[in-house]
Amino acid sequence: MSNQKYKLLAFFQAILQPLKPKNWLFLFLLLGCFLQIRNSTIQPQKAWAQSQKDTSMSEENASEERYQVIGNRQGKVTVKDARSGEIIRVFQMEEGVIVRETFVLDYDQIIAASQKDKTIFWNLETGQEIARLDQRVHSFSDDRSRFISFGSNGLLVSSYPELTTICQLSEEPSREGTKGLAQPEFSPNNRYLEVNWIFGKPAADEDYPVPGTTGIGGRLPGFRELFDLEVCRAFQGFPQMRNILYPGRFSSDSRYYFIEEAVFFFGDRLAEGTIQFNLKTYEAVQIPQLFDDERNSR
C-alpha cells in the first residue's frame, strides 16, 4: 500500500472521530471512490514496508570505501576488498540461517554480523571470534559507542566495545511473527532513541526481508516509540508520535523530534504539516503546510 493511501487513511480517521458510527459506512464508501480516482492521476509510491527493508551490508561509510561485507542466506559472511574484489576473509555463522546485518567496527579491525537471534564479533586480522551475544544487533549510533539489540532479553541499549547493558527498554522477548524492530535510530547526541515496532517482524527466514503485516482493514502495521536513554524510559502522552505512517526525524542538535506529513486539526480546519516535539519540555507545536481545501485542489 502506498504512503499516499496511508495518509488518506489518517485523513479519514481524523474526520471519523467526531462522527456517530452510523455515518461511517457512507464515508468509507466515499473513501473507496476517492482512492480509485486518485490512483488514476497520481503515480504510485513505494510501500512503506518496502522502504523499511533490512539490509545486510556494512553501515560504516569510511569502511565501505575499503571493505564490502556481505552476509548470505546460508549464514556465510564474506569480507572483500571494495576496490579489487579480493576475498579477505570468510566467516561462518549458524548454517542455513540468514545473515541480517553486518558491521565494520574499530577502524576496520572488527567485523560483526547478526542473525535473527544472535550476533557474533570477529577480529578481522586473526579471524578469531571475540564475542557472541544472544541478541540480534540492529544498529549502532553514529559514533559506534552504543548499539541496540532485540532478542531473548528484550530490547536493550548497550555500550561498545564494553558490550555492557545501558538500558533495558523492554523485557518482552523477541518472538517470530509477533512484532520486531525496523531501522531504530539514535539521536545525534545519543541521548534519545527512535524505535519503530512492526507487527509480523522479525520475519521468518523464508520470508525475509519482507515481514507479514496487518493492513488497512485491520490494525495499523505498527507503532513508534521514543526513549530517553538518560532515564531508560519511553516518552508518554503524545499519541501522534506513535503513528509510524508519518515519517519522523531528530533535529541535528537533538533538541526536537519532527513528525512530518502528519494530518491533524489546526483550529477547526483539517491540515497536513509538521509536528515539532520538544524533547526537553515535552511540548508539541503543530506547523500546518496545507489545509484540507488546498489538499483537494492539488
Image: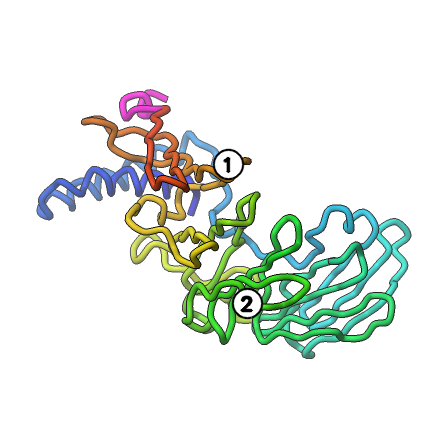
Image side of residue 39 versus residue 103, left or right:
left
Instruction: Determine the residue located farthest toward the bottom in the rendered image.
Output: 95
| Residue range of the region highlighted in magenta in the rendering | 290-298
Q: Nearer the viewer, residue 242 or 280?
A: 280
Q: Magenta stretch containing residue 234, yes or no?
A: no
Residue 92 location, quadrant? bottom right
Which residue is label 1 attached to?
A: 251
Q: Earlier in the sequence, mark 2 or mark 1?
A: 2
Image side of residue 182 versus residue 240, left or right:
right
103, above or below 73, in the image: above
Residue 69 location, quadrant? bottom right
Q: Amino acid at mark 2?
A: Thr
Given contact means CB atoms under 8 Å apart, are the residues at marks 2 and 1 in contact? no
Q: Amino acid at mark 1?
A: Ser
| Position of residue 36 measured from the top left corner of the image (x, y, whole percent) | 34, 38
Count of number-bearing discs: 2
144, above or below 271, in the image: below
Q: Nearer the viewer, mark 2 or mark 1?
A: 2
Q: How is the structure coloured here?
A: rainbow
Q: Nearer the viewer, residue 225 or 222?
A: 225
17, above or below 290, in the image: below
Image mark for residue 146 = none
| Position of residue 43 measured from the top left corner of the image (x, y, whole percent) | 48, 34
Which residue is label 2 attached to?
A: 165
Q: Residue at x 41, y 62 (%)?
A: 199
Quadrant containing the C terminus is top left
Provide the secondary structure element on which disc 1 rests: loop
Q: CA distance from mark 2 to mark 1?
A: 26 Å
Image side of residue 251 versus residue 218, left or right:
right
